[in-house]
Amino acid sequence: MGVFSYKDIYIEDRRRVLEVNILPEKYCNFDCIFCPIGRSQNKVDTQKSFDEMENSLKELEIIIENTKAELVFINSKGEALINDKIGDIIDLIKDKGLPVRLLSNGYLLGRDEYMKIADKCDEVIGEIKVIKEEDFQKIQRPIEGYTLEEYISNMVSFNKQYNGKFILEITIIKGYNDDEESIQMIKNTIKKISPDKIIVTRIEDEKFKKKLGIADERFKEISNTLLNNW
Ligand code: SF4
């Protein structure tokens, strides 16, 4: 048996989507206070080798066949690019004739080695959460030396050369990026990154919803502003 884990297949735009986590435990270059997976014990941004990859790849192939998947979404416990077999995983899915969607927090997309890997995917999702440097350091707790400015410029560089569909997921967080000034800053950032699609979301995890979740009405207002003006 392999070490990847899977969600039940679901339908999206009439396509059967198979969602796969390719990390045995959480590995991320951030340690967000609201992370649904918990604290980052392994805060890294260099690739790692994991056990059981050969079996995991074989199992993935069988699961793709058995579920008749039409798109594979790599959505992992942290930053999927950390798995040093991610290139092989993407190649296997592409060899089966299927499109690949990759979720990354986006920071590593500006680095050559990771850019090349993400370029193989048909769709890449990058993220923006907070929009001020101090908040980035305080609540996303990245690896030392990371800056919000570099985070955004990494996604800008990636998308400039990327031929696939770049999706930007923006999370609205109560008290951090839900004021008018922040919304304006987010709009400017969207313009710079120039994604093909935007998803606006909010903190839904029950553990953090009370403190960081935004009310329906304000969320709707912000979503409309962001989705209709870029
Ligand atoms: S970037 Fe995502 S996976 Fe990583 S710590 Fe933040 S919320 Fe968790």
Image: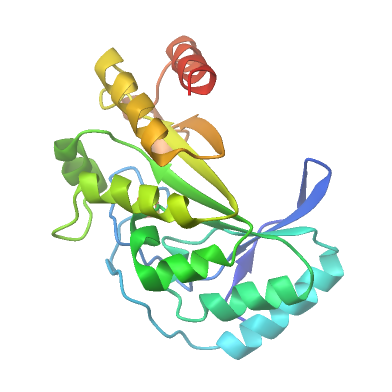
* On screen, residue 187 above or below 103: above
Does residue 104 show up?
Answer: no
Q: How many marks?
A: 0
Query: Is residue 74 rendered to the left or right of residue 46?
Result: right
* On screen, residue 219 above or below 120: above
* On screen, residue 82 above or below 165: below
Does residue 168 show up?
Answer: yes
Looking at the picture, how far across and down is residue 163, in whole percent? 58, 55
Q: Quadrant of residue 34?
A: top left
Q: In the rendered image, which quarter contains the N terminus?
A: bottom right
Looking at the picture, how far across and down is residue 226, in whole percent? 46, 21
Query: Is residue 96 rendered to the left or right of residue 82?
Result: right
Q: Quadrant of residue 191?
A: top left
Looking at the picture, how far across and down is residue 186, in whole percent? 34, 28
Q: Quadrant of residue 143?
A: bottom left
Query: Is residue 208 rendered to the left or right of residue 159?
Result: left
The structure residue drawn at horizontal position 29% and vertical position 56%, both measured from the top left corner, is: 30
The structure residue drawn at horizontal position 48% and vertical position 18%, both measured from the top left corner, is: 229
Looking at the picture, how far across and down is residue 126, in whole percent? 45, 48
The structure residue drawn at horizontal position 30% and vertical position 61%, both measured from the top left corner, is: 29
- Scheme of colours in the image: rainbow
The structure residue drawn at horizontal position 35% and vertical position 59%, both measured from the top left corner, is: 110
